Amino acid sequence: MGIHVPDAVIRAGLASYLQQDRRVREIPSDRMHEADVIVVAVDTVDASALEQLRAVSNRADARFVMVVGKQWQADISTAVDRGVRGVLWRDAFTPPMFLRTLVTVAEGGGSFPPALQGTLMEQVQWTQREVLTPRGLNASGVSAREVDVLRLVAEGEELSEIAVKLSYSERTVKYILYGLMKRMQLRNRAHAVSYAIRSGLI
């Protein structure tokens, strides 16, 4: 775990909590890019605070847990896009909760206070309803018919068999599959199926 906190006292406190759990260990600041999770403590989360996360780690897959002292004034979707996977309010902070959040995020999960979860869900719902559904897409950027084709490819069906099952021409099935592969930069059918499984599409 990496800790990026300007306040020396808060930083020392957070570092001491890491020593209470063998599953986590602190990474030195000069090796921050190696950390599975980076802890950032700020008073207020706003657009500027989110922008500063890029200076902390420029890894595209960086995951952050933010310890927030006062207010959340940023777009939650933007925060998730910047790599924020966990948020803890300082006034409700406990060492067990901190350690549990770090482990959850390190294992690929997320942990947000209920109010932020609600806001995020409302934004996802609005995006799905107003932006994606009119274009025949879902949040993954994959259409329902592309998911149908991927599911049948994963089941070992040939393109001709998929065409019959979905009442498409074989040419249409090829167009759907290869269009998806090109858009998502997937190398072959196996890669497409793997992507669909990892993304929870099938």
Image (tube, rainbow, N blue to C red):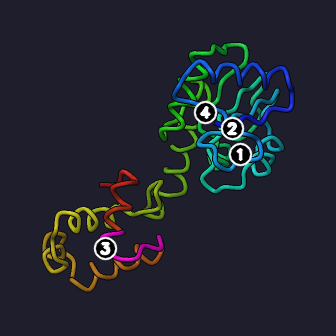
In the image, the segment drawn in magenta is: 184-191
> Badge 1: few (under 14), some or many (20 or more) residues near its Cα, within 10 Å?
many
Q: CA distance from mark 1 to mark 3?
A: 36 Å
Q: Kindly indicate the quadrant of the structure image that contains residue 45.
A: top right
Who's the residue at 73% across and 39% down the image? 28
Q: Amino acid at mark 3?
A: Arg
Q: Amino acid at mark 4?
A: Gly
Percent position of residue 128, x then y: 49, 51
Q: Earlier in the sequence, mark 2 or mark 4?
A: 2
The residue beneath circle 3 is 189
Viewer-side label of 1, 3? 1
Give residue 86's mark. Answer: 4
Left or right side of 114 for 26: right
| Dot 2 and dot 3 residues touching (CB under 8 Å) | no
> What is the count of numbered marks?
4
Percent position of residue 121, x then y: 53, 37
